[in-house]
Amino acid sequence: MSRWSYHPPILAYHRVGPYRADHVPTVSAGAFERQLALLARFRYRVLPLDDLIACFDRGARPPRRSLAITFDDGYEETCTVAWPILKRFGYPAAVFVAPGEVGRAGFASWEQLGELARDGIMVGSHTMHHSYVPLLSAEHLQDELQRSKAVIESRLGRPVQYLSFPSGGFTPKAQAAARAAGYRAACTTNRAAPGAGLDRWALRRIKMTERDAHPLRLLAKVSGYYDCFRRLKRPS
């Protein structure tokens, strides 16, 4: 499957809520709600990430007009702003967190993440300390992937099967380390090897912005053919 083929849309958010004077990509609560309302209006089906991966396991194409929603970093607003809106629409999501950041100012606590998990949100790993994996030594990489998985599983009492590479950076060694650590799949952003097709260890996601509350922009991003219109960066 080439970049010109259909790719199941996986939407990637960071923070949903008020804008702050920092570098974090932020979508306002109003724009986020309008985006979800458009998905409902155009009859898109939001799947748990598990269901999307299950289609890959069977070698099947996900149902038409289906997608998954993910959040990186585990900001507190994911729990206090985004999740209540998702619940109103009945949409599942996945949240990737770095245990080293959990509980810090601006980030969700373990108690909040536990509530999300009990309410059906999948919590995955974003490495132990939000590390850019292409710069890590083999030993450090193994620790970042294995320890983050173990800590989240211990704190939430649920298996961690999915990984999101911070800043989307990955290498073949990082992909192999993720497999060895027991992850079922890994997500990136808009990075891919030249000509790469569907790779479960580098699932390309679509960065969502405030402007994507416009119906035409949103429909382009969830069409399954968005790769045809965007420039894919190299893996690292």
Image (cartoon, grey):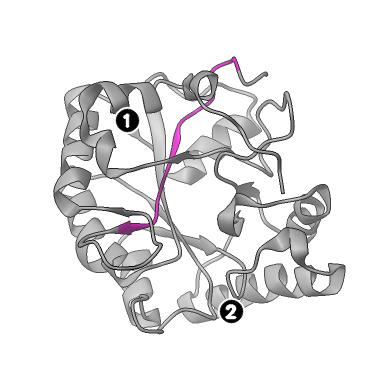
Q: Secondary structure at mark 1?
A: strand
Q: Is residue 93 left or right of residue 236?
A: left
Residue under the image location 64 percent in, 34 percent down: 57
Residue under the image location 32 percent in, 30 percent down: 45
Would residue 10 be counted in the magenta stretch? yes
As measured in the structure, the alpha-carbon distance from the residue carrying label 2 to the one carrying label 1 is 32 Å
Is residue 28 in sight in this rendering? yes
Does residue 149 lie above or below 85 as drawn?
below
Q: Earlier in the sequence, mark 2 or mark 1?
A: 1
Q: Is residue 99 left or right of residue 116?
A: right
Dividing the picture into quadrants, the one containing residue 82 is bottom left
Where is residue 27? Give x, y as percent. 27, 51
Q: Secondary structure at mark 2?
A: helix
Labels 2 & 1 near each other (Cβ < 8 A): no
**Tag 1 residue:** 45
**Tag 2 residue:** 151
Q: Amino acid at mark 1?
A: Arg
Is residue 161 in sight in this rendering? no
Residue under the image location 40 percent in, 33 percent down: 67
Mark 1 is surrounded, within 10 Å at the Cα level, by few (under 14), some (14 to 19) or many (20 or more) other residues, namely some
Q: Is residue 135 left or right of residue 23?
A: right
Where is residue 176? Give x, y as percent. 81, 52
Would residue 86 be counted in the magenta stretch? no
Where are the magenta residues, as a range? 4-15
Direction front: furthest residue: 21
Residue under the image location 77 percent in, 55 percent down: 174
Where is residue 21? Give x, y as percent. 30, 68
